[in-house]
Image (cartoon, helix red, strand yellow):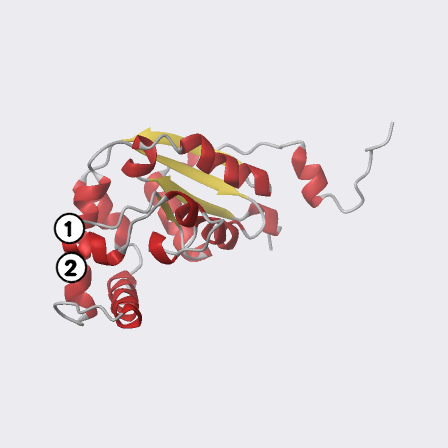
Amino acid sequence: MSHPKKERTLVVIKPDGVQRTLIGEIIGRFEKIGLKLVGIKMVVLTEDFIEKHYTLNPEWRRITGEKRVKAAREKGEKLPTEDPFEITAVILEKLKKYMTSGPVLAMVWQGAHSVELVRKITGGTEPRSSDVGTIRGDYVIDSYKMADDDGRAVRNLIHASGTVDEAEKEIKHWFKENELINYRLIAEQILYDVNLDGLLE
C-alpha cells in the first residue's frame, strides 16, 4: 500500500476563476496547506470533453440531481421538476456552455488526504451556502436560485474531485502520464519524515 502522501486529486479553475484573476490566490491556498503541484496546464475545452468528464462517474446524474432537489427544499424554492435525471440533463447542458466559454486551468495536486482537504478548502458546490474561509465562500456570491433564474450554470470558480476513485478517473481524462511530474519538495521533509532528521546544524 502506498503512503498517503502519494494521493492525488484534480482541480480545475473554471472560466470565471481565470477571468477574475484568482489563479494565484487559489494555487496559494493549496500550497499553504502543504500540497504539491505535480501537473498544470491551461486549455480550452470542447462540449464532448466536458460531458465525458461529468459522466465518468455513472452515478453523477442521480447524485447531482438529488443534491439540487435537497437544496431547493431546504431553501423553500420550487423547481420545475423533482426528477433528478431531468434536472441533471438541464444542468449538464448549462455546464457545457459554461466550461467551454473560455480557458480553464487544470491541475493535479498531491499530498496526504488531498481529495478531502481540497474539497474542504474549496467549499460546497453552491457559493451562497459555502462557509466563510473556503474559496467559494470567500470569493463568490452566486446561488442555485440566481443561476436557475438566469438559465445558466452556477459560477463557483473551481472543480475538485469528490472521491479518491473519482480523482483517479478524472486525472486520466485530463492528463497524460508524462504530463505529471514526480519530484521532491523540501517542505515534504517537515510534513512527512518521521524523525525530522538533519534540521540542526
* Labelled disc at residue 150: 1
**Front residue of this view, candidates 137 and 44:** 137
- Mark 1, Cα crowd under 10 Å, few <14 / some 14-19 / many 20+, is few
Q: Is residue 179 visible?
A: no
Q: Position of residue 181 (x, y in %)?
A: 50, 32
Q: Is residue 164 left or right of residue 77?
A: right
SS label for mark 1 = helix
**Front residue of this view, candidates 168 and 137:** 137
Q: Position of residue 93 (x, y in %)?
A: 15, 51
| Displayed quadrant of residue 199 | top right
- Which residue does the image show at 23% across and 32% down from the upper left? 102
Identify residue type, mark 1: Asp
Q: Is residue 88 above or below residue 159?
A: below
- Which residue does the image show at 23% across and 45% down from the upper left? 50
* Labelled disc at residue 90: none
Residue of label 2: 89
Q: Position of residue 161 (x, y in %)?
A: 40, 51
Q: Is residue 97 left or right of residue 197?
A: left
Rounded to the nearest whole Å, what is the CA distance between mark 1 and mark 2? 17 Å
Q: Earlier in the sequence, mark 1 or mark 2?
A: 2
Q: Is residue 101 visible?
A: yes
- Which residue does the image show at 45% across and 52% down from the upper left? 119
Count of labels shown?
Answer: 2
- Mark 2, Cα crowd under 10 Å, few <14 / some 14-19 / many 20+, is few
Q: Is residue 153 above or below residue 187?
A: below
CB atoms of marks 1 and 2 within 8 Å: no
- Which residue does the image show at 24% across and 49% down from the upper left? 52
**Front residue of this view, candidates 194 and 148:** 148
Q: Position of residue 120 (x, y in %)?
A: 49, 54
Identify residue type, mark 2: Ala
In the displayed image of the protein, which residue is found farthest to the top? 201
In the displayed image of the protein, which residue is found farthest to the right? 201
